[in-house]
Amino acid sequence: MRLMKLVPDNTNIDFLRWKLFAVVTSLLLVGASIFCLATRGLNLGVDFAGGQMVQVTFAQPPQLDELRTRIGALGVGDPTIQEFGSPTTISIRVPRAQDETVEQANAIAASIRGSIAQNYPGSRIDSVETVTGKISEEFAWDGALSVLLAMLGVAAYIWIRFEWQFGLGGLVSLTHDFIIVMGFYSLTQIDFSLNAVAALLTLIGYSLNDTVVVYDRIRENLRKYRKMAIEPLLNLSVNETLSRTINTNGAVLVAITALLLLGPDVIYDLTIGIFVGVIIGTYSSIYVARFLLVPLGVGPDSFVPKDPISRAARGPRNETDDGARV
């Protein structure tokens, strides 16, 4: 039986035809993401903001304004109350107080549980998370440091394996993806928790995998087609790896879509981050990581030895009777 191919072997798409459109699109997306981050910020989860988050399943959908008033009357600050997957499942988050101790945090969580049990019979406390200020600051620092080190490590790896232009192109591509995904979290105000950091780290590793494969094909073609101009060579390299990109990214998107539709709400901020990151990463791996090599000066002579010594310059090869070179 003949296998079905999503991308024919003779595919020859001129990706550079839309390079101006791609540049404008990237600038708009990055600019809009930075604007959202500056004006709206991130909806930091309890992991980073600190405080208490109580997830409750009610027997009947509660009136959110009434529930907010009752929780606020406990003197725990201005609570954030949202539906969590269904009208009967509610997430209650209260901010941490300044210099709040573990004992005080536990007392606040206990008062919230007691108020719900008293005013809403039949309700069930599904989970209680309490994070103090010191722990939330450690989480924020460790999360930011892990993302930064991962990005620098990826750039260093590509630099060592290929050339500095490839390393810089990979770093710019990762930064492009990172800013846009962060802008998506800011625009939608989805909780930005440790799950979101895990999504960003997954995106960095996944983007590295695709980038290295394509960069290796570009280097191979640079050595193979010495007289080919750099832009047609990049187009050729993209088309040759297009089947692999579509098959791999398509399979990942199918799995992530299943998690988005059927998976638990507790990992929604993780799955949505990976879903958006794969789409943006696929686009940037074509138009940012690869074609950024042109302005960085990569050309047909990039992988030519600096001072090649031809066989003619070395003179004829003389061998003794036993085959040894003299």
Image (cartoon, rainbow, N blue to C red):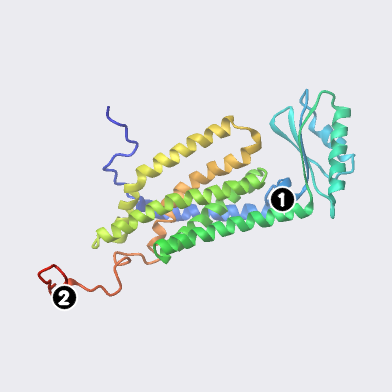
Q: Is residue 70 above or below residue 293?
A: above
- Neighbours of disc 2 within 10 Å: few (<14), some (14-19), many (20+): few
Q: Residue at x 41, y 64 (%)?
A: 165
| Image coords of residue 153 (percent x, y) | 52, 60
| Image coords of residue 174 (percent x, y) | 51, 55
User: Mark 1 or mark 2: which comes first in sequence?
Assistant: 1
Identify residue for label 2. Answer: 326
| Image coords of residue 275 (percent x, y) | 53, 41
Q: Residue at x 57, y 49 (%)?
A: 200
Q: Quadrant of residue 130?
A: top right
- Neighbours of disc 1 within 10 Å: few (<14), some (14-19), many (20+): many
Q: Residue furthest left?
A: 321
Element marked by disc 1: helix
Query: Which is nearer the eye, 37 or 290?
Result: 290
Q: Residue at x 48, y 63 (%)?
A: 156
Identify residue for label 1. Answer: 48
Q: Quadrant of residue 112?
A: top right
Q: Viewed as shown, does residue 209 lie left or right of 220? A: right
Q: Amino acid at mark 2?
A: Val
